[in-house]
Amino acid sequence: MPAFTSSRVVKHSAGDMFDLVADVERYPEFVPLCQSLRIKRRNNSDEGVEVLVADMTVAYKVIRETFTSRVTLDRPRLVIHVEYLDGPFSHLDNRWEFLPREGRACEVTFAISYEFRSRTLGMLMGAMFDAAFRRFADAFEQRANVVYGVESKAG
């Protein structure tokens, strides 16, 4: 099963980076392959945890696939967990963790594992997905630089 993990220190606070990744409605503006994203449901808890159910459409040339995920935004722990619900995969699990570092920095860890239901689709999109996931961390860091400037305020 394909898997990818990236960890890097960025010059933005853990809170700012959490907020940036949690703002899933903006993904079509900057996330590789993301053509559209629609929130179907949103539930909040008293503990600062929000759970979304969302449809994301990924597209590459003539291939277009939509899948549904449950996204748990755990602000108190600075963790975002994405669990696959329906679509072209047999498995998809994605986790973001944001660890505060000295000054106005944080360590961002992105991990994903996935497997396509169809071997043919896996062969068509697998290499492209791998390349896109390797660019995810860069895309979010570049987005943070645009949204928060070169360095963000501590938060």
Image (spheres, grey):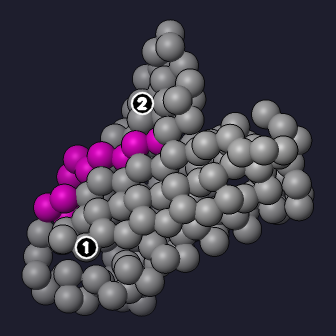
Reply yes or no: does residue 148 show up in magenta.
no
Would residue 97 be found to the left or right of residue 59 on screen? right
What type is the residue that disc 2 sits on?
A: Val
Residue 45 lies, with reference to residue 105, above or below; the image says above
SS type, badge 1: loop
Examine the image and state in which quarter residue 140 appears: bottom right
Residue 15: tell me if it is visible: yes
> Which residue lies at the image location 11% right of the left edge and 76% below the top edge?
118
Question: What's the distance in space between the residues labelled 2 and 1, CA to CA?
Answer: 26 Å
Predominant secondary structure, magenta span? strand
Would residue 15 be found to the left or right of residue 87 on screen? right
Which of the numbered marks, if any, corresponds to residue 101? none
Residue 126 lies, with reference to residue 2, above or below; the image says below
Residue 35: tell me if it is visible: no
Would residue 85 be found to the left or right of residue 105 on screen? left
Examine the image and state in which quarter residue 66 appears: bottom left
Circle 2: is it few (<14), some (14-19), or many (20+) Cα within 10 Å?
A: some
Residue 72 lies, with reference to residue 147, above or below; the image says above
Reply yes or no: does residue 89 show up in magenta.
yes
Q: Position of residue 131 (x, y in %)?
A: 44, 83
Examine the image and state in which quarter residue 76 appears: top right
Q: Which residues are magenta?
A: 80-91
Q: Quadrant of the N terminus?
A: bottom left
> Which residue lies at the image location 52% right of the left edge and 55% below the top edge?
109
Judge depth for marks 2 and 1 and give the one in front: 1
Which residue position holds label 1? 2
Q: Position of residue 39 (x, y in %)?
A: 45, 42
Which residue position holds label 2? 51
Q: Residue furthest front?
A: 102
**Residues at discs 2 and 1 in contact (Cβ within 8 Å):** no
